[in-house]
Image: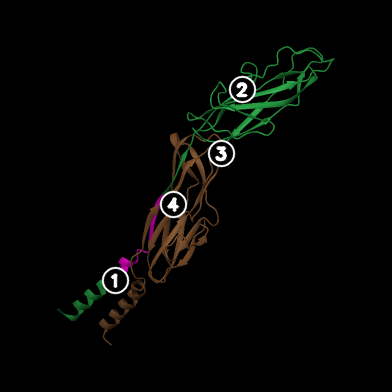
Chain colours: A brown, B green
């Protein structure tokens, strides 16, 4: 076989695994976690199954491929004049839906990187809930925090 | 075009395609938001005052007595229900002497004149609602029972009210 043929075969073999990964990986923040009105001293829980207030990410990626989901989670939300309010994520506060339906989630711990397998259409949704823990003397005002989801091909 | 050149183009295309697909990580962010309402503030605005008390003669101050009943002023989030509870002394003290204080009564209202107010038992507590401006007034009355040989003096005790959403 000619040397050129070996080079071509080598290049194709190098590319095949990458091509097999299919369409590009995209992650989209669809909806934030909304606690709404929170009273000082009264914890407010948003469930990952809450269709109006839970956070949602949509992910498009490899058909049938395994990916790693990992979050960067805030410990606090920041309010007026730098006031902080704790936000807590529990061991089942994240959910993964292969049908992108909030009603058919598989719960997982957002504090730990989690491996999931994409469905054949390559589209999934990830939902997240949390608990806000205002102090009894929590300063009034609007508080925000950022939740980041990173998805990595395996 | 020579075959070696064609081969180079094919290899380059394959490698470039592969390189583009090597963007194996992606991420996005969402925001968690909350709107914290006004914290509760409680002020002991007026003492529960029995005035002069005579040995062997019980004296009662009604919660409706705007002059002598104890009063707490509460502020917080407008039109929001709260739970109030009390720590109530069983006796008043004076230099080692004690005098029983019993039969606590209470009134809460959304104005400082008790108009439309509601009576309640401080022992049981209550769940009133702050008015449209976020204010609430609470009065406390009670009865003292001096013994016939009650030592003279000024007797005091502390009544604590706790308010939570």
* Label located before the other in sequence (2 or 1): 1
The subunit carrying tag 3 is: A
Q: Are marks 1 and 4 in contact (CB under 8 Å)?
A: no
Q: Quadrant of the C terminus of chain B?
A: top right
| B111 sits left or right of A82 in the view | right
Q: Which residue is mark 4?
A: A52
Q: Position of residue A144 (x, y in %)?
A: 43, 43
Q: Are marks 3 and 2 in contact (CB under 8 Å)?
A: no
Q: Which residue is mark 3?
A: A41
- Of badges 3 and 4, nearer the viewer stands 4
The structure residue drawn at horizontal position 22% and vertical position 78%, both measured from the top left corner, is B7
- CA gap, disc 1 to disc 3? 58 Å
- Of badges 1 and 3, nearer the viewer stands 3
Extreme residue in the left direction: B1
Q: Position of residue B58 (x, y in %)?
A: 77, 18
Label 2 crowd bin: few (<14), some (14–19), many (20+), radius 10 Å: many
Q: Which residue is mark 2?
A: B71
């Amino acid at each position: 076989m000619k040397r050129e043929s070996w080079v071509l075969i080598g290049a194709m073999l190098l590319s095949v695994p990458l091509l097999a990964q299919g369409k590009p990986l995209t992650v989209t923040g669809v909806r934030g976690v909304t606690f709404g009105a929170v009273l000082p001293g009264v914890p407010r829980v948003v469930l990952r199954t809450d269709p109006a207030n839970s956070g949602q990410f949509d992910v498009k990626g490899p058909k049938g491929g395994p990916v790693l989901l990992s979050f960067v989670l805030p410990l606090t939300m920041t309010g007026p004049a730098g006031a902080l309010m704790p936000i807590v994520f529990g061991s089942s506060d994240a959910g993964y839906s292969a049908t992108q339906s909030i009603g058919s989630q598989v719960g997982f711990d957002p504090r730990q990187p989690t491996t999931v397998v994409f469905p054949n259409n390559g589209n999934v949704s990830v939902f997240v809930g949390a608990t806000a823990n205002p102090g009894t003397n929590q300063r009034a005002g609007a508080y925000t925090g950022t939740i980041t989801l990173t998805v990595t091909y395996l | 075009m020579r075959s070696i050149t064609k081969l180079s183009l094919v290899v380059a295309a394959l490698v470039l395609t592969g390189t583009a697909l090597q963007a194996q990580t992606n991420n996005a962010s969402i925001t968690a938001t909350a709107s914290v309402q006004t914290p509760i503030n409680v002020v002991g605005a007026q003492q529960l005052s029995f005035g002069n008390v005579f040995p062997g003669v019980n004296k009662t101050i009604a919660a409706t007595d705007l002059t002598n009943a104890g009063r707490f002023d509460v502020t917080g989030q407008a039109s929001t229900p709260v739970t109030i509870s009390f720590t109530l002394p069983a006796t008043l003290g004076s230099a080692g002497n004690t005098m029983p204080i019993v039969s606590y009564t209470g009134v809460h209202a959304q104005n400082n004149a008790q108009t439309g107010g509601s009576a309640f038992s401080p022992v049981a507590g209550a769940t009133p609602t702050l008015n449209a401006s976020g204010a609430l007034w609470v009065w406390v009355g009670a009865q003292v029972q001096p013994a016939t040989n009650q030592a003279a003096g000024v007797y005091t005790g502390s009544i604590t009210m706790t308010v939570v959403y």
